[in-house]
């Protein structure tokens, strides 16, 4: 923790965590690389940590049985559960509960190098400041079940996804919590754009939550509201920061409208 940063103190606050370890150096390296925890050496020579937000401190202890089952479970907040699970595996951890296990919450669980079970938590797409969001809406002349099929059937989705003039080549499409969607978009000029998206939650036929984890990174919330034989579509993008949103808004706003235009054309063919 920086010298000029002090955590909020008070009666009842969780203030210190001791994490069982088999190898303190290995555990410290894992948490620093995956979560950007600050590692320091105390006056007695022991290794301690401060979390990335500077609110909780702790240490690793040897000779204590790891928390190999989810009894008392600690959750670490992350910007992206999908991205973090990949970092966990790369750092020597193991995923023991994939995205979707606590749906609609965006969570996962992993074991660290010592075998401790730890949870990951990501804020839902409805939260966050308005200056990080781009919202598009459209009422289409199609039943909600048909619109759902257009969003989740790769044969239909590949024909309408993207701005005007773009085509798609799907390499992987697995519409379930934690499932991956990898594809290449080709623009009218022939330029190709690789994309990687992860499905976080699907509640048929009302709601789809996914995360675009290749740049730029953002969450997408799709809400389908039934209006007799019509469907109101809400398409909400939430970016990591207001700056990212401001950078991409001039591109995304017209592109999203073109995307919905193409969806309407596909729905007419499906009717």
Image (tube, helix red, strand yellow):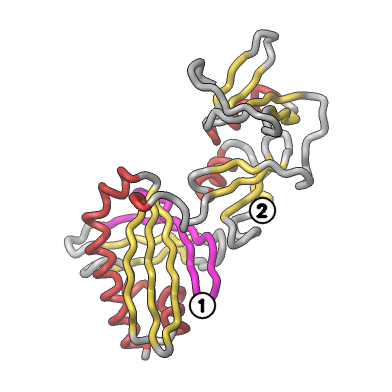
Q: Where does the image place residue 129, in percent across and percent down from the top left? A: 40, 49
Give the mark nearest the N terminus, 1 or 2: 2
Q: Residue at x 26, y 54 (%)?
A: 249
* Picture quadrant of residue 49: top right
Q: CA distance from mark 1 to mark 2?
A: 25 Å
Label 2: few (<14), some or many (≥20) within 10 Å? some
The reply, left or right, for residue 187 in relation to residue 58 is left
Q: Could you tell me which secondary element the residue under label 1 belongs to? A: loop
Residue at which label 1 appears: 205
Q: Residue at x 65, y 22 (%)?
A: 25
Closer to the eye: label 1 or 2: 1
Label 1: few (<14), some or many (≥20) within 10 Å? some
The magenta span reads: 192-217
Residue at which label 2 appears: 97
Name, please, the residue furthest toward the front.
11
The reply, left or right, for residue 46 in relation to residue 254 is right
**Observer-nearest residue: 181 or 59?**
59
**Observer-nearest residue: 11 or 84?**
11
The magenta stretch spans residue 214: yes
Q: Residue at x 33, y 82 (%)?
A: 140
Number of marks in the image?
2
The reply, left or right, for residue 105 in relation to residue 260 is right
In the picture, the disc for residue 166 is: none
Check the image and report above or below for 188 versus 140: above
Q: Could you tell me which secondary element the residue under label 2 belongs to? A: strand
* Picture quadrant of residue 148: bottom left
Image quarter of the C terminus: bottom left
The magenta stretch spans residue 191: no
Q: Are marks 1 and 2 in contact (CB under 8 Å)?
A: no
Image quarter of the N terminus: top right
């Amino acid at each position: 923790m920086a010298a000029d940063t002090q955590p909020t103190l008070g009666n009842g606050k969780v203030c210190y965590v001791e994490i069982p370890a088999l190898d303190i150096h290995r555990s410290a390296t894992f948490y620093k690389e995956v979560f950007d925890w600050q590692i320091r050496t105390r006056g007695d020579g022991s290794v301690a940590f401060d979390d990335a937000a500077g609110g909780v401190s702790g240490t690793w202890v040897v000779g204590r049985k790891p928390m190999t089952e989810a009894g008392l479970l600690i959750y670490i907040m992350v910007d992206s559960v999908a991205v973090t699970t990949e970092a966990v595996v790369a750092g020597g951890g193991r995923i023991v509960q994939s995205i979707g296990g606590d749906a609609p919450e965006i969570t996962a669980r992993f074991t660290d190098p010592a075998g401790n079970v730890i949870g990951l938590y990501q804020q839902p797409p409805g939260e966050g400041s308005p200056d990080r969001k781009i919202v598009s809406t459209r009422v289409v002349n199609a039943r909600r079940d048909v619109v759902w099929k257009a969003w989740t059937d790769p044969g239909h989705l590949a024909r309408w996804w993207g701005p005007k003039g773009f085509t798609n080549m799907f390499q992987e499409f697995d519409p379930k919590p934690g499932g991956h969607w990898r594809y290449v978009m080709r623009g009218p000029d022939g330029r190709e754009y690789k994309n990687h998206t992860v499905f976080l939650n699907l509640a048929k036929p009302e709601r789809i939550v996914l995360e675009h984890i290749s740049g730029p990174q953002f969450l997408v919330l799709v809400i389908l509201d039934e209006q007799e034989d019509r469907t109101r579509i809400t398409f909400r993008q939430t970016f990591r920061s207001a700056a990212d949103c401001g950078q991409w808004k001039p591109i995304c706003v017209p592109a999203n409208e073109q995307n919905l235009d193409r969806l309407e054309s596909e729905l007419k063919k499906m009717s």
